[in-house]
Image (spheres, rainbow, N blue to C red):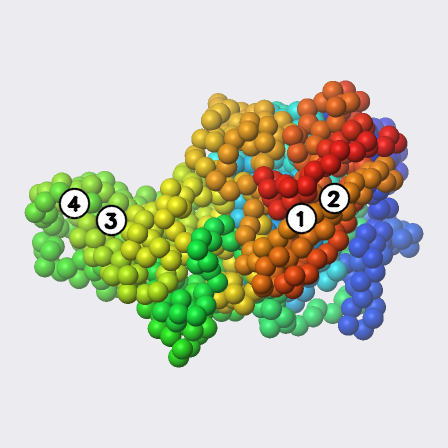
Amino acid sequence: MSEDLSRRSAMRMIAAAGGVGAALGAGGCAPAVPEPGAGRSGPATGAAGAPATGSGTGTGTGGAARIDALLERLTLQEKTALLHGAPDPAGRGQAGYVPGVPRLGIPALRLADGPAGVRVSRPATALPAPVLLASAFDPALAREYGRVIGREGRALGQDVVLAPMVNLIRTPYAGRNFETFSEDPRLTADLVGELVRGIQDEGLIATVKHFALNNQEQGRDTVDVSVGEQTLRETELRGFEAAVAAGAGAVMGSYNKVNGVHACESRPLLDELLRGSWGFDGWVVSDWGAAHSTVAAIRAGLDMEMPGGTHFGEPLREAVHGGSVPEAAVDQAVHRILSTMDRFGLLAARQPARPPRDAPAGARVARKVATAGAVLLRNEHATLPLTGAAARSIAVIGPTAQVPFVGGGGSSHVVPDGADAPLTAIRRRVGNAGAVRHALGEDLYGRPLPAKLLTPAADLEHREVGPGQVWTHEGTFRLAADDEWTLLVHYTGKRPGVRLDGEELFPVRQGVAEHYAGALLGAAPDGMAVRRRTLALKAGTHRLAVTATGGDKGQRLRLRHITGAIRAEDLAEAVRTAKAARSVVLFAYEDATEGRDRTSLALPGGQERLIEAVAAANPRTTVVLNTPSGTTMPWLSRTGAVLQMYYPGQEGAAATADVLFGDVDPGGRLTQTFPADERTTPVGADPARYPGVGGRQEYSEGVHVGHRWYDAKRATPLFPFGHGLSYTTWQYEKLTVRPQHGGLRVEFTVRNTGRRKGTEVAQVYVGPSEELRLDQPVRALAGYRRITLPPGAAQRVTVDIDARTLSSWDPEQHAWVLGSGRREVFAGRSSRELPLRAKVAAASR
């Protein structure tokens, strides 16, 4: 770039260039992208009738001129300070902070995590996990969900929320599947667009993440994803494109590499596709620690580094002074940030007032979402709903029945206002009309080690270590016979060292994994952290050594154990309790978190054995699953019912009771295929697909992600995409399909043939075009409608299939091409239950 050009002129030239490279070219069939700053979601109004700041009326000419004037007055030091994070002097517990420039009226920015509610140190509404929201197949509900996040983020002093996460569910092993929506690109795009609008309706800036292909936690910092252009365009990118079309203010770059280049320094992704093809006019922020360079990153289009200034602080200033980065590139990044802030009213002389929190309203939405997304997977012999005698004699079994299971770990963890345990909600619902008895089934927290077991004797149950002190115990204990032991350490400070026969049982791990308790709950009811280790111990003497430090504040700790005899006793008690009741509700779980993938699709611990034993004792056993993703179920045939509740948020206990007792119909449907076994998944039998080989991962499944792969391979899943039962019965009839406006109009009748009011999700799929010589799904989701009908009622359902849905991405033309000719259309209750079908000639454009 010529040095005699003004920085502002150069910046505008760079912004206008937006070339489209061969690898990620522009599309011809994409939905119209609004002008920069235009109101993508319509002019929402606030309480006083003024346009909400998030409706995005834009900076306009005056705003752009004001930002240009600000840029002229900013020093290079001040500019770069706006391009990276710093410690927050107020310490509100959010993820990120960017100091403003007070002398010029540029306020600081606070950025909070928020996939399932606003994550700060203060209480906020803990919403159900996004995967449970998605299970409702209801974009309007997604907008309500977003508005709760938007209002609470503003109320809690935040300006930006790091949500939504829209990466596809590609493998059931991915540790953050609960934080995202679906394996299906169409469903994801629909929900993401409305969620972004909801967040920004309330004046909070939404940050869509992680761009792109961050579909697993294992090796996420280093893995190089090899993906073809058609695959990328037709699968992973659909949700991001929808977020941009909805006006998302920011995009977060992911950790991984894409086709050999880190995502945060990928010009094809950030400059050519995001800005050039889609017209994105907000700013791009790195995931925390995902920036890997200075010159390459800012030249590619990264605007903000988080959490600090490793690359965009002093190194960026040095690069400008040395000539490797033109100051115009810095100006451009600052301009994007300031323009977005201005769009949301953050640069106004009188900034928008922050609303108060409305905790009751947030709780109502949380409960509404949790009931709407509940998926009834199995229901034999009318096990559910619980009515009559079955509702008056209930055995509630499982450790998490008496522990509120609100959400997963990592970025989605929210401090709730409060949360009931399921056992409490069930007892409240039954009241004095019946008996509810609880059995633990499996001990999660252990029993005290008898002092007399240890030599020398020691009380390891109530141990306090004062500030600055170190406490140690060294001794032995003797086992009379071989046994399987689980040793547990509970602690409030730095994790104590526990060595058994010279081996450290609880080594400190790196990063987020340090906070992960191996799929079992990581905190005791009194808040103490818990870590477990299960070992096969031989008969004889064993050496035990414990070392704990008090640190600055001191700490409490306890060491506990679970033996084979304890396990047998707990199981026997559960069986006795189940036999004595008319019906059983058994709560099963898996705790998942950011930073760790699952190591198995089976339930952790001894839960499978517990379910088998209890269901054998009482066939009217309902298993309620609080799990993050698809789960294998070798115990399925023994159960009466299975209810998938994922991570249901702070109102999850009440919502679960609502569904169990039939106060609401389970209206959720699976947004991901549940595999029949560990290997029969789109990536399960090929390590090159997951987790990758030699640091490289291949998306060689192509466009056949999720249910599309099962159809292509004719593989039978445990439960198909879109599956979910109702408490009533449904009939589909009278399908008609006709061409319309370059797409298709599909109409059919859905009838409630049962005796109860119910909710149905009618789904439409479309087959491939024989005239396209491109890889195409056997069936692609083309649309859906969520409907609620009284018994005996019928509704005529209309689903319009647009040209984009009928198109494929041609990597040679770098464009969407319409699949004309005869297309087969299907309608029904899931991807595998499609009683209606018709063929029609799709019109050419």
Residue drawn at (92%, 52%) of the image: 61
Label 2 – label 1 distance at C-alpha: 8 Å
Which amino acid, by three-letter code, is at mark 2?
Answer: Leu
* Quarter that holds the N terminus: top right
The first of marks 3 and 1 along the sequence is 3
361 vs 394, nearest the viewer: 394
Q: Label 3 vs label 1: CA separation?
A: 53 Å
Which residue is labeled 2 in the image? 735
- Per the image, label 3 sits on a secondary structure element best described as strand
Place of residue 487 in the rendered image (x, y in percent of width and height, measured from the top left): 24, 50
Residue at figure coordinates x 20%, y 41% from the top left: 536
Residue tagged 4:
483
Q: Tell me the crowding category of disc 2: few under 14, some 14 to 19, or many 20 or more residues within 10 angstroms, Cα based.
A: some
Image quadrant where one finds the C terminus: top right
Left or right: 437 as drawn, with respect to 374: left
What label sits on residue 732 in the rendered view?
1
Tags 2 and 1 touching, CB below 8 Å: yes
Q: Residue at position x 79%, y 40% from top?
A: 737
User: In which image quadrant can residue 600 be found?
Assistant: top left
Residue hosting label 3: 486
Q: Earlier in the sequence, mark 3 or mark 2?
A: 3
Q: Name the residue at 54% across, 59% down.
A: 727
Q: Secondary structure at mark 1?
A: strand
Mark before the other along the chain sequence, 4 or 1: 4
Q: Nearer the viewer, mark 4 or mark 1?
A: 1
Instruction: List the single residue furthest toward the right.
Output: 61
* Residue 230 in view: yes
Where, by quadrant of the figure, is residue 740 drawn? top right
Image location of residue 146, percent across then percent down: 67, 58
